Image (spheres, helix red, strand yellow):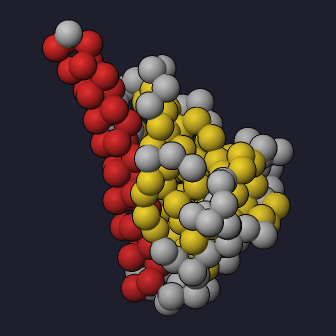
Amino acid sequence: MMIPSYLNFNRNQEVKQAGLFIKNIIRDTQNRSQSGEKELSSCSPLVGFYGQFSTGVNTFLTGGRCAASDFDTLSNKLPSNKVTISAFYNASSYPTAACSEIAMNNGSLRLMFKTINQGVDFFDWNSGSDMGTALSYTKIGIEVTNSAGSKYVIIIGNNGEIYDITGC
C-alpha cells in the first residue's frame, strides 16, 4: 500500500510545484511592472508587464509592453512535463462562492500588470489583436492539473493580490 500512496503524493507535489512556479514568475512580472523597469530607452510609454497563458500546454509567456509592442518576451516551461495549464476561472466571488470556468473565445489569457501599482487588467488575447478583449472580472484563477486529476489554482486579483489554492 505504500507505493500507491507515494505515487499519489508525488503527483500532487508535481502539480503544487508547477502552481508555485507560475505564482513566483507572476510575482516577478508584477514587481518589474511596479518598479517601472524598462530595458529599452525607446520604450515610451511603458504600459507594464504581462503574463500570457493558454490551456493544454506546459509553457506560458511573460514580457514587457511599450505603447503598442511587446519586448523581452520569455517562454517559461513548467517544471514537470506531466502538468499542464488546464482552465481559467472567474474567481471574483471566491472564497464566499465557487469559481466558474471561463471559456476564452480567443484561447489565451493575458494579465497586464500596469506600472506603479495601478493594478492588473485581464484580456482574452488573440495574436491578431493588439491586447485582446478586456475581461471585467475582479479575480481570475489559472488552474494547473495532471493526468491523475490533481489540481492547483493561482488567483490573481485586479488589485494585484496573488495567492494559491488547491481548487476553486
Residue pictured at 34% horizontal, 49% vertical:
21
- When the figure is inspected, residue 73 is found, relative to residue 2, above or below; the finding is below
Residue 75 locus on image (x, y percent): 45, 45
The residue at 67%/67% (across/down) is 92
Q: Residue 69 sits in which quadrant?
A: bottom right
Give how far across and how far down residue 12 sits, in percent: 34, 32
Whether residue 116 is visible here, answered yes or no, is yes
Q: Give the side of residue 166 with respect to residue 125, left or right.
A: left
Q: Is residue 17 left or right of residue 147?
A: left
Q: Nearer the viewer, residue 126 or 21?
A: 21
Q: Nearer the viewer, residue 109 or 17?
A: 17
Q: Is residue 53 above or below residue 136?
A: above
Please state if 13 lies on the left or on the right of 60 as rendered: left
Q: Position of residue 125 (x, y in %)?
A: 73, 53
How many numbered discs? 0
Residue at 66% x, 60% y is: 97
Q: Is the N terminus in the top left, top right, bottom left or bottom right quadrant? A: top left
Residue 143 at x, y = what percent?
54, 44
Q: Quadrant of residue 118?
A: bottom right
Foreground residue among 78 and 39: 78
Which residue, as the protein is rendered here, is positioned at the far left? 2
Task: Give 122 or 129, whichever is nearer the viewer.
Answer: 122
| Residue at the spot 36% in from the left edge and 67% down from the top edge | 28
For residue 109, say whether it is visible: no
